[in-house]
Image (cartoon, rainbow, N blue to C red):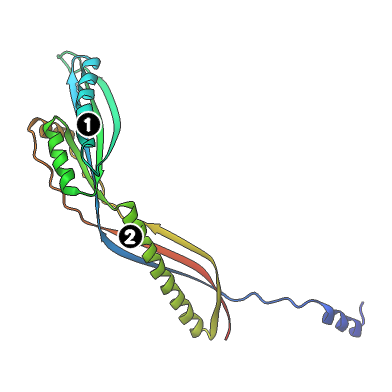
Amino acid sequence: MLRPALLALCLLTLPAVAAEPPVLTLGESSERAIQQDRLTVALRAEAMGPTAAGVQAEINRRMEAAVARARQSAGVSVETGAYWTHEERPQNQPRRWRGAATLELSGSDMAALTALAGALQEGGMAMSGLRFDLRRETARAAEDELTAEALQRLKLRAERAADALGLRVTGYRAIRLGAAGGEAPPRPMPRAAMADLAAANAPAPIAEPGRATVRVSVEADVLLGPK
């Protein structure tokens, strides 16, 4: 066994172990309701007939006309979507084929876009839904502002908490940012209603945007030390 004097000398020569600084984990968030500034209109070209080739030819004719007409409108994004055909065998009736193809139009000029949708309905397209959301530039600008707000709130909260503990903030680590943009869900129409709209040369849809909530969250580990 070590003598007491030797044991004391060994303890004096050991390196001092620094105490871990107190860490306070905080989270804050900031949100804002923003007027939605982009409209997406979903349309369908539908056809039914005795042969698959005839149905596909009719769908293609309507889609080509709709795409050509939409591309003439400045500021409108044009995107084709799903395309399907299937055979139906109704009881006591001849077999028939049914098919459809989808088209999405997006833009910020909502009056022009709804007018275009009405014109395409007159050409045989059927309305299947409307969706409002935020342009990417709008959402990003809002997120930048909200991030600055949330970080400032977290900083003030950390300083107040540290003061209440008789300590001070010495630094931050592991800062985490999160963001989520708001979007209104599509407004679908039943299949029967779509066919009726196309057949009746329905007028342009009425579209009124709402507000989307953009929310940003921040979280950080706050290092504390003595005053």
- Residue 206 appears left or right of 135: left
Q: Position of residue 159 (x, y in %)?
A: 48, 80
Quadrant, the C terminus: bottom right
Q: Badge 2, how many Cα within 10 Å: few under 14, some, many 20+?
A: many
Q: Position of residue 100 (x, y in %)?
A: 23, 27
Visible residue check, residue 193: no
| Residue at figure coordinates x 87%, y 82% from the top left | 9
State whether residue 224 is above or below residue 68.
Answer: below
Query: Is there CB contact under 8 Å for labels 1 and 2?
Result: no
* Amino acid type, label 2: Val
State whether residue 77 is above or below residue 82.
Answer: below
* Amino acid type, label 1: Ala
What residue does disc 1 label?
68
> Tag 2's secondary structure?
strand
| Residue at figure coordinates x 27%, y 51% from the top left | 133
Compare residues 22 and 181 and report the one nearer the observer: 181
Mark number displayed over residue 227: none
Compare residues 133 and 193 and report the one nearer the observer: 133
State whether residue 225 is above or below residue 41.
Answer: below
Mark number displayed over residue 214: 2
